[in-house]
Image: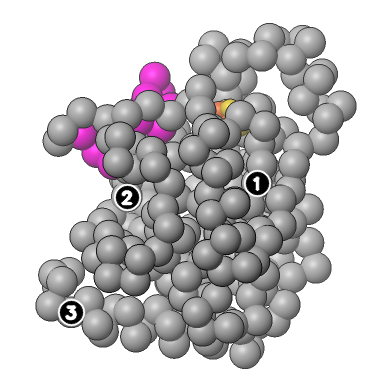
Amino acid sequence: MNDTSNFAIRLADTVAILERIANEFAPAVFASSLAAEDMVLTDLILRNKLDIKIFSLETGRLHKETLAMLERIQETYGVEIQLFKPKIAAVEDYVRQHGVNAFYDSVEMRKECCRIRKVEPLNRALSGNKAWITGQRRAQSATRAELAVQEDDVAHAMQKFNPLTDWSEEDVWHYIRSNNVPYNALHDKAYPSIGCEPCTRAIQPGEDVRAGRWWWENPESKECGLHVVDGKLVRIKSI
Ligand code: SF4
């Protein structure tokens, strides 16, 4: 059952999971994309003063509205989000060899761009931690239907937590509106899911919430590699 009447239970469960991560899996980090789900988790972590560091991947191709969220978080919570950026030499090599927008040419070129701009910086950000947290939800896409709250992330040799696994989109927005949480202005322009600017577009009414991400690809290939190992989704072991 996933109606809003059980929202208070889901919220309490989420806070309990975050507290458990902070207490039992320190040092732990939260990878924030600065989108709606991640603003819920940012608010819960900072409101409850949990010992969980928050970082974001600054790919160099983000929308100005997404970058503006960094300032809004600073103004609202007095906290600076740590940024991890791609290696300049790797970006320059890719652009020189393939072109600045080669990710449109093939899935392989797209994954290579994501590897350079997201996966490698993510690996650096996770290094030295026992657990990481994402704002992923099961209902977001076909690729996330089997998402578990806690997963054994063998690739990074750490635990991965998805505390919003059971949340619906209505839950996310109910929390944001009820608690006056700042959110990315693109969400009001038909962007339910937000990635890099050239790889994200607004969706039409009735479309899947992730239909605007890498819209030129098949739904099955639509992950950035942050949750993929050797070309396969990392759903190694649910705990
Ligand atoms: S989402 Fe697009 S621009 Fe961003 S890293 Fe992936 S391919 Fe590159």
Mark number, residue 57: 1
Q: Is residue 126 magenta?
A: no
Residue at the outermost right position: 89
Amino acid type shown at disc 3:
Asn
Q: Are marks 1 and 3 in contact (CB under 8 Å)?
A: no
Identify the image quadrant of residue 207. top left
Identify the image quadrant of residue 147. bottom left
Give the residue displayed 81% in from the left and 20% down from the top: 92
Residue bearing mark 2: 140
Disc on the earlier residue, 2 or 1 = 1
Q: Secondary structure at mark 1?
A: strand
Give the residue displayed 60% in from the left and 14% down from the top: 101
Q: Is residue 208 magenta?
A: yes
> Is 8 or 23 nearer to us in this picture?
8
Residue at the outermost front position: 75
Amino acid type shown at disc 1:
Leu
Disc on the earlier residue, 1 or 3 = 3
Between the C-alphas of marks 1 and 3, the distance is 33 Å
- List x then y, in percent, for residue 221: 44, 33
Against 123, residue 78 (above or below) is below
Q: Is residue 91 visible?
A: yes
Tell whether circle 1 marks a residue whose Cβ is less than 8 angstroms from ligand 1. no
